Image: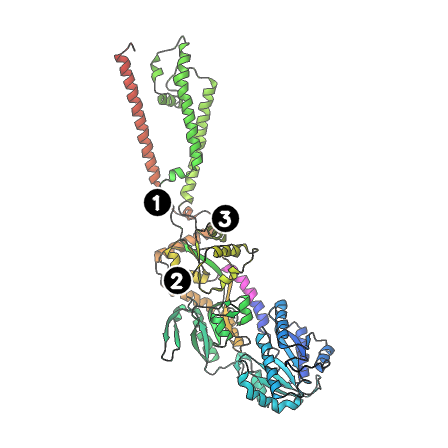
Amino acid sequence: MFDHKIKLLVSIFIINHLSCFTISNPKFIGDKSFGRYLHDSCQAIHDGKNFHLNLIENFQFSNTTSWMEPKSLVHEFLNQINCPFKHFTNINSKDLSIKLNNQTKLIGYYGFLCIFDLLHQSNDLNHHEFIELIMSLERVYVRCIDCYPLIILIHPKLLQQLIEWLIDSFRLFDQKFRCIFVVSDYILNDDYDKNHQKVIHVRPILDGCHIFNNVYYPRNENDFNRMKISYQKCNLNQTIIRVAVNDIVPICAIENRQIGLDGKVTVKMKLSQSLDLRLLKILAQRWNFRYQLVDSQQNWGTFVNDSWTGSIALIRNNLVDMGICGISQTYLRNLAVDYSFFITIDKIGFLSQFPSKSSRKWLLFQSFPWQNWLAILISYILIWIFLHLYYCKICPLLLMNHHHHRSRSKENLPISMKLCAIYLNRAIKVDCPEPTSICIIYLVTMISMMITLILYSAAYYLQLNTSHYEKHIDSVDDINEYFRSGTHTLVTRKSDENMNIIKHSRPENNILYTINEHVIKNKPVEVLNDVSGFDLVQSDSKFIFLSTKLILYYLQRAYARKTVWIGTESLKMDINAFAFPKHSPLLKPISYQILLSHERGLYQKWIKDIYRFTPLLNRQSYLEAIRFQRTFRKWSTSSSMISTSSPPSFSQFYALDLSDFEAILHSWILGIAISIAILLIEIIIWRFRQYQQSKYPSR
C-alpha cells in the first residue's frame, strides 16, 4: 500500500536508477587491443559514463624493493588522447586505498578502474615477490568501496610462470579478489594487433552471471564469447543461491525454523504473507536457480565496532549470495554491499493506541474554564449583595422621609421576589424610589446575562462536537510534544537501522533530533519483530511503535485486537531492495527482473492480494479505525486549503450518545430542586413573619 503522493518521487528514482543501471561495466575481456580498450574507455568518460580511470605506476608492493621508473607509455598514451585520469606513482597499498576511498566520498558512487603498470617492475619478478604483489593488490581491491576488477600490466616473459604461480597460489587469494593480468610488450596504440597480448582473468564472470572461481585463460573465440554473454541471457543451471532472510510480515513471514541432524537451520516461509518470497520464486524460475534460505536471526545489519552484523555481515563475508526481507538502503550499507533495483519506497510511520473517549459527565461546566465561572459567580454575588443592601438598608431610610408612601406590606416582600418583579417588567410595584445607577445596574446585568448565555451556548455546542475523544498522536509535532513531556516510550525493532539514523541525527533535523534526545533520556523498548511491537502498543497506551506504513497497515488488519491509530505524517522515507556482495554477477539479472516486475504491476498486485485475503482479527475495531482515519484525513485535506489551524477531533462527524446529556439532566434537576427549596424557604419565612405580625401587632 503506497501513498499516491510519492508516485512522482518513485518515477524520479526509477529514472535516476536506470541511468546507472543500463551502463555496461568497462571490463577488459582481451578480444581487442589494450590500446583500443583505453581509447574506448576514455571516450566513455567524456560521454559522462559513471566510472573514473586511475593509473598506478611504481607500485610499492614490497617492503624491500622500490622502483622509480619514468612515466610509462600508458601515461603518455592517455595524455595523447586527452583522457581524464588520476595518476598515482611510488605509492603503497595502504595509501592507495585511503586515496581511492577519499575519492568515493568526494564524487559519490562511481566505479573506479585501476590500471597497474608493472611492465618494468615485473621484468625480474620472482615467486616470493609475486605473492607480495598479489597480497598488496588484494588489500587495494578488497578495501576499495567501488572498484572494478584491477588491470595489471605484466612483462611478457613472465607468461608461463604467471599462469603457474596463479594456479598454485589461488587458494591463498581472498575470495573477493578479482583482477585481469595483461601480458604485453611496450608497443601501445589503437591499431596494435591483439594477438601480441595475452590476458589472464582471475574470477571472471562467465555466461552472464557465473563467477568462475579460478584462473581463466581464454585461448579461442568461444572463450572470449563466454565473457561477453549478456546478463539478460543468464542461466544459472539450478545453482543453489543462498539467501539471508528475516521475519518481517508481510514482506517475509517465517513460518518455522527447524534444526537438522547436521546442525543446519532450515527456514520455511509462508508464501501467502511474504511479498519477497513471491518475487524470489519468479527470479528462480526466470534465471533457473534454486535457493536456500539462511536465517539472519532478526538482524538486518548494523555497523558496530568497525564491523557489520546480521544480513550485511553474511553478505560481506560471502556466507550468502544475497539478502532480502526489507533491507533498507543507507549510506553505510551502500558502502558495504550493492543494492538491486528498489523493491518498495515507503514512509516510516508511527503507531499508537486509538484515542480513548473523554469524560463527558460534567460537560455542562466544561464550556467555560474555571476562571470564567469564578468571575461570573463573583459578579453575581456582588450584584446580589449590593441590591440586598440597597433594599434592606438604604430603601427603608428613604421611606422614612417619604410622606405619601403606600401600604408597607410590599416592603416585607422577599428580596428574590422583588428582583423577579423587576426582571418581569415590574409587574409588582415597589414604593422605593430608584436612582439612575440602580437602573444602569439592572440594564448591564440583563445585557451581560444575554451575552453570557450566547457565549455559553456556542461554547457548549463546540464542546459537544469537538471533545468526544482525547488528543491523538497524528503528526510529528504530537510525537515531539509527548516525548518532551516524557509520558510515552518509543518501541523499535531490534537492530533497526532507523534507530542508528535517529541516534546520529543533527540539530538541523528537528524531528529526528528531538526523538534522539528522548532516546538518550529514555532507552527505547526493542522487540524481535513487528508483531511483538504491535502487541506492546495494544497492551499499554504509553508506547509508540515505529515501522514502515506498509507493515503498520498490515498489522492493523491482521493482528489488531483493539482499535489502533496510524499517524498521518511520517518521519522519513525508507527504500528497500535486495542486497548483494560488491560486484556480484547476480546483481544485474535480478535487478532487471525486478524492474520488469514493477513495470507489469506485479508487486502492487501482490500487496492487494495479501490485504484482500488476510482475515480480520477484530472486524469492528478495524473498520472503526479505517472509518475514523479516512474521515479525519478527508477533513484535514479540505480544511488545509482554507485554514492552517489544527483539525478538530473525530466527534465532529458522529452523533452524540444519550450518556452525553447526563450532566445536563443532573444540573437541570439540581437547579429546579434548589430553586424550589429556596422559594419554599422564603415563602415559609414570609408566612412566619406575617403570622408573627398578626399575632403580635404591637411588635
Q: Is residue 491 left or right of residue 75?
A: left
Magenta highlight range = 1-13
The answer to whether residue 408 of the structure is visible from this angle is yes
| Closer to the eye: label 3 or 2 | 2
Query: Is 4 within the magenta?
Result: yes
Give the amino acid at mark 2. Answer: Ser
Foreground of the two, 570 or 89: 89
| Distance between the alpha carbons at the discs numbered 2 and 1 | 35 Å
Mark 2 or mark 1, which has the lower sequence index? 2
Callout 1 crowding tier (Cα within 10 Å): few <14, some 14–19, many ≥20: few
The answer to whether the residue labelled 3 contacts the one labelled 2, judged by CB atoms less than 8 Å apart, is no
| Distance between the alpha carbons at the discs numbered 3 and 2 | 37 Å
- Find disc 3 in the rendering and name its residue: 639
Q: Is residue 496 left or right of residue 168?
A: left
- Find disc 2 in the rendering and name its residue: 532
Measured along the vertical axis of the image, is residue 560 above or below residue 337?
A: above
Give the amino acid at mark 3. Answer: Ser
Quadrant for the N terminus in the image:
bottom left
- What kind of colouring is applied to the model shown? rainbow
Expressed as whole percent of the image width and height from the top left, the position of residue 11 reads 55, 65
The answer to whether the residue labelled 1 contacts the one labelled 3, judged by CB atoms less than 8 Å apart, is no
